[in-house]
Amino acid sequence: MLQQFYPQVFHDYRYELNKDMNLAAAHFIPDAEAGVCQQMHGHTYFINVTIVGDELDRTGFLVNFKTLKEEIHKRYDHSLLNDHEAFAGDQPDTIPTTEVVAAQIWQQVDALLAERPNRPYCLQVLVRETPTSYVTYRPKKEDHR
Ligand SMILES: Nc1nc2c(c(=O)[nH]1)N=C([C@H](O)[C@H](O)COP(=O)(O)OP(=O)(O)OP(=O)(O)O)CN2
Ligand SMILES: [Zn+2]
């Protein structure tokens, strides 16, 4: 299946965890460049997050798969993305394009992981908006905690 193709990130952490999820959401891109996508429309977004680390927590997890799903799926499923504060502005980094959605999910997941004593790290977020279009977001070296 097309959605099961993942770009590999090379690293030397001991553990790598991947969590897939689907969510249904609507959006619109308020710019003439977006053509028909200026009109509100929906997607079943496919999301994959890649988490790495050298240490596990006391449960033997890098991070619980369910925690990741709750953070992302619960927030955005069956919502209009433009209604969320992060996507409500008119600056390029607040328009709910696939690129910005991927970057925003990275920010959220990074904030969540920063609180964990075993310090896992999100190395990649993949957001597929349609069967033919996806974006991967990878933090720069200077974003590393
Ligand atoms: N760089 C980006 N380009 C476009 C985005 C985006 O988020 N980043 N988004 C859109 C629209 O929201 C649209 O929903 C998706 O566009 P597209 O892949 O063109 O959709 P199609 O299903 O029509 O693709 P086909 O391969 O032509 O069937 C537009 N551009
Ligand atoms: Zn769209």
Image (cartoon, grey):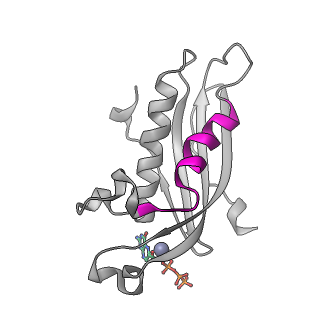
Residue 37 lies in what quarter of the image?
bottom left
- The answer to whether 95 appears left or right of 136 in the picture is left
Q: Point out residue 32 in the picture as x, y percentages from the top left corner.
A: 27, 83
The residue under the point 72% across, 60% down is 4
- The answer to whether 91 appears left or right of 102 in the picture is left
Q: Locate the C terminus and report the quarter of the image it occupies.
A: top left
Magenta stretch prevailing secondary structure: helix
Looking at the picture, does residue 67 appear above or below residue 92?
above
The residue under the point 23% across, 63% down is 90
Q: Point out residue 73 in the picture as x, y percentages from the top left corner.
A: 60, 50
Q: How many marks?
A: 0
The residue under the point 49% across, 21% down is 115
Residue 55 lies in what quarter of the image?
top right
Looking at the image, can residue 7 be seen? no
Q: Is residue 79 magenta?
A: yes
Q: Nearer the viewer, residue 78 or 113?
A: 78
Looking at the picture, does residue 18 appear above or below residue 80?
above
Q: Is residue 31 magenta?
A: no
Residue 111 lies in what quarter of the image?
top left
Q: Point out residue 95 in the picture as x, y percentages from the top left corner.
A: 33, 63
Provide the residue span drawn in magenta.
Answer: 64-81
The residue under the point 42% across, 60% down is 99
Residue at the far bottom in the pictured view? 36
Q: Point out residue 42 in the picture as x, y percentages from the top left corner.
A: 54, 74
- The answer to whether 94 appears left or right of 138 in the picture is left
Looking at the image, can residue 13 be seen? yes
Q: Locate the N terminus and report the quarter of the image it occupies.
A: bottom right
